Image (cartoon, rainbow, N blue to C red):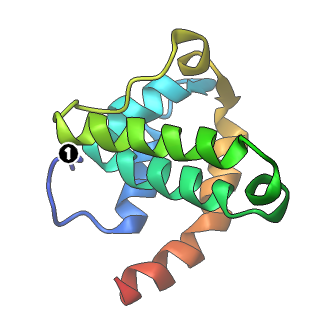
Amino acid sequence: MRMGQASSSLTQVLDCVLGPDNVERVTLEDILRRLGPRSYGPGLFLTSAFSMLPPISITPGLPVLTGTLTLVLAAQLLVLRPYPWLPSRLLQISIARVRLERLVARTRPWARRAGKLV
């Protein structure tokens, strides 16, 4: 299933994050490309949730930084970029496929619950 289809559930999105079985490591760029426009939701959620953490929210200047990151992501979504632009150094961050599979497996029950609410 292509991620451009609106009918994909959260669990299908998690399956898309894993991608092909034949790779040992998965980069952030691989994940963003697979998710396409659906990658904006987690990005916006993480930047806004991060800005609400007590040490961040009370430290001078950090709320402005996290707000700016949220604004940059939202602007990229507004101009219809296929997935968020990030510096190449961040895009090359990778995780072992085995670890990613475990993370997806732990996240799946939460995704099912959230999918029912949404």
Left or right of residue 70: residue 7: left
Q: Residue furthest front?
A: 60
Left or right of residue 75: residue 98: right
Looking at the image, which residue is at 46% across and 80% down?
A: 114
Viewer-nearest residue: 45 or 112: 45
| x and y percentages locating residue 95 in the rendered image | 68, 30
Viewer-nearest residue: 26 or 20: 26
- For label 1, the residue is 2
* Residue 64 position by quadrant: top right
Left or right of residue 17: residue 1: left
Q: Residue furthest right?
A: 55
Figure check: 14 above or below 92? below
Q: Is residue 20 visible?
A: no
How many marks on residues? 1
Figure check: 72 above or below 74? above
| x and y percentages locating residue 33 in the rendered image | 34, 30
Figure check: 80 above or below 89? below
Q: Which quadrant of the figure contains the C terminus?
A: bottom left
| x and y percentages locating residue 99 in the rendered image | 73, 42
Figure check: 113 above or below 70? below
Viewer-nearest residue: 54 or 35: 54
Looking at the image, which residue is at 60% across and 11% down?
A: 89
Looking at the image, which residue is at 29% across and 34% down?
A: 76
Give SS at disc 1: loop
Tag 1: amino acid: Arg
